[in-house]
Amino acid sequence: MVDEPEAALRAEREEHLTREVEASFEATPDERLRAVMQALTRHLHAFAREVRLTAPEWEAAIAFLTRAGSITDDRRQEFILLSDVLGLSMLTVGMNAPVTAEATESTVFGPFFVNGSPEIALGGDIAEGVPGRPCHVAGRVTSTTGAPIAGARVEVWGADEDGFYDVQYEGDLVQARAHLFTDGDGRYDFWTVQPAAYPIPHDGPVGDLLAATRRSHMRPAHIHFMVSAPEHTTLITHIFVAGDEWLDRDAVFGVTESLVIDFAQHDRGEAPGRMIDGPWSSARFDIVLAPREGAESRP
């Protein structure tokens, strides 16, 4: 057991080191970078002191981060996954979301977005052969004043009925992801497949962390959206399937009540723009974009 004088001496040495590291960033020309690095130093050192981090634990953490870096490539981002399961992604989303009650809520980006998705026409099908029940999604994009936003870019992506994204398969197939543009009245619609709940990738270090802490690796069924338009803040969000059993246990804490949508179920027959020879579903998702800072939504 450490006596009080020795404990006080140790605490002073630890605090001196923290101050020394913090001061090392004083000459940083970029004010924001300086503030971030000094705050990171204070909080990181405080965390280590609070848990009395041991050398083996430090080594395990370095090994964990090394594994996360090794498994990350242009098709998988393990560090985003780590940020997601620690709630950091959703916290950052919330802190940076527009303070506009009328606007559609944001949620996490996720690790499976890919630049350069194909463009489809209104009413087109993003599935491109992905297995699953056909699902029609439609809605309008408007400003916070209710004015329609014509030409808004609506980027959508999702998983197949087995819960896998195209980038999780071998090859270069692009499926269940595309973008389209709203019409003059702000309307959009597209076909995809009914989303299903799925596990986040858990064959790497993040999965090991969830297993060690007895946490679920499941996400409720959802479709991703990224919606952008001039003079408006880009929205990154999902729609979730009402009634999904994982809504209150999302591994990445991304569910908000306003994003839970009813997916109506239909029998075979006539559907928007086509005949469906089997069951299909539909959902309506109206999107409200907040004005970009310094811009105003025009009626």
Image (cartoon, helix red, strand yellow):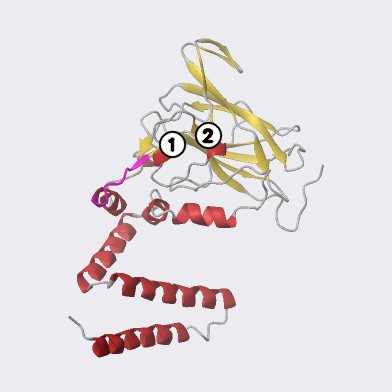
Label 1 CA crowd tier, 10 Å (few <14, some 14–19, many 20+)? many
SS at circle 2:
strand
Residue on which disc 1 sits: 247
In percent of the image, x 23 and y 69: which residue is there?
59
The reply to whether callout 2 and callout 1 are in contact (CB within 8 Å) is yes
Q: Residue furthest right?
A: 299
- Type of residue at label 2? Val
SS at circle 1:
helix
The residues colored magenta run 212-218
Image position, residue 5 (x, y; %): 26, 90
Residue 149 has which mark?
A: none
- Type of residue at label 1? Leu
Residue 260 has which mark?
A: 2
Q: Is residue 147 left or right of residue 121?
A: right
Q: Is residue 146 left or right of residue 117?
A: right
The image quadrant where one finds the N terminus is bottom left
In percent of the image, x 44 and y 33: which residue is there?
221
Label 2 CA crowd tier, 10 Å (few <14, some 14–19, many 20+)? some
**Magenta stretch holds residue 119:** no
In percent of the image, x 46 and y 37: which residue is there?
174
Looking at the picture, does residue 243 appear above or below residue 209? above
